[in-house]
Amino acid sequence: MRFFNFHKHQSSDFGIYNLSLGEEIPDFMFSAGIHPKDILEDFKAQFSWLMTVATHKNCVAIGECGLDALISFSDELQKKVFQQQISLANDLQKPIIIHCVRKFQELPNFKKNASVPMVIHGFNKRETIGNKLLAEGFYLSFGKSLLQNVDLQEFFKKVPINKLFLETDASEIEINEIYQKASELKNISSEKLNLQIEENLEEIGILI
């Protein structure tokens, strides 16, 4: 069985490949966005590239994009670029894959401007943060932290199964390892979990 990898930086595996700025469009499923760490002061050329690749049939989501408190770029610029990508996603009706570091309290205000689903990738924060995001209608995608972080594992058990995805991000972990741990925590088979995630993908507008 092929386990769906919601967010990956490897061209192998079955799932959504994270396309880098300026990278050639692949012949498989991908997402495209301007990561906070890549923003230039004059980002018009970056956004022009994004608008071009985002319309491609293989582009299924916008991102990863978002907010990062550990990056030196100004909050104002990060917010401006994030909002423009939300507007683009709205226009194309494609879901958004969000990168967020220490800015979770600001995300609900941005969600008010989104007419498409928003997924927090690589979620590994406290249960209180996770519950607030779920209450606001965000989806959560879990990665390698699910294998070791006991507190995260306890929270994962409580996450509605129709509101989650699984991913490897840039790690060398195999996606089937994450599915195995996730299925143990949810007390269901990996196959059943994979089928549920396929339903979740359809719910946010991604057909595989």
Image (tube, rainbow, N blue to C red):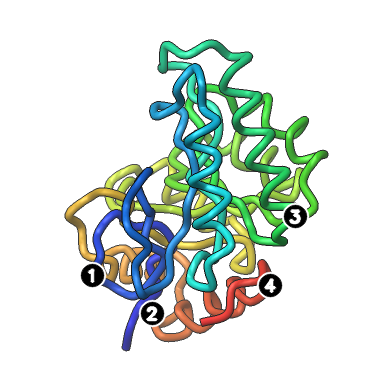
Dot 1: element: loop
**Number of residues whose C-alpha sits closer than 10 Å to that of mark 1, classed few (under 14), some (14–19) or many (20 or more):** few
Q: Earlier in the sequence, mark 4 or mark 1?
A: 1
Q: Which residue lies under the disc numbered 3?
A: 91
Mark 2 residue type: Ser
Mark 4 residue type: Glu
Q: Earlier in the sequence, mark 1 or mark 2?
A: 1
Between 199 and 27, the one nearer to me in the picture: 27
Q: Distance between the residues labelled 4 and 1?
A: 25 Å
**Number of residues whose C-alpha sits closer than 10 Å to that of mark 4, classed few (under 14), some (14–19) or many (20 or more):** few
Q: How far apart are marks 2 and 4 (CA)?
A: 20 Å
Residue at image x 47%, y 43%?
123
Dot 2: element: helix
Q: Which residue lies under the disc numbered 4?
A: 203
Q: Earlier in the sequence, mark 2 or mark 4?
A: 2
Residue at image x 31%, y 63%?
178
**Number of residues whose C-alpha sits closer than 10 Å to that of mark 3, classed few (under 14), some (14–19) or many (20 or more):** few
User: Contact, CB < 8 Å: mark 2 with mark 4?
Assistant: no
Q: Distance between the residues labelled 1 and 2?
A: 20 Å
Label disc, if present, on residue 190 of the rendered structure:
2
Dot 3: element: helix
Q: Which residue lies under the disc numbered 1?
A: 12
Residue at image x 47%, y 52%?
32
Q: Which mark is nearer the camera, 2 or 4?
A: 4
What percent of the width, then of the height, locates residue 14?
A: 34, 75
Mark 3 residue type: Asp
Q: How far apart are marks 4 and 3 (CA)?
A: 18 Å
State the quadrant of the N terminus. Answer: bottom left
Q: Is residue 91 left or right of residue 28?
A: right
What percent of the width, then of the height, locates residue 4?
A: 40, 73
List the single residue furthest toward the left: 172
Q: Which mark is nearer the camera, 3 or 2?
A: 3
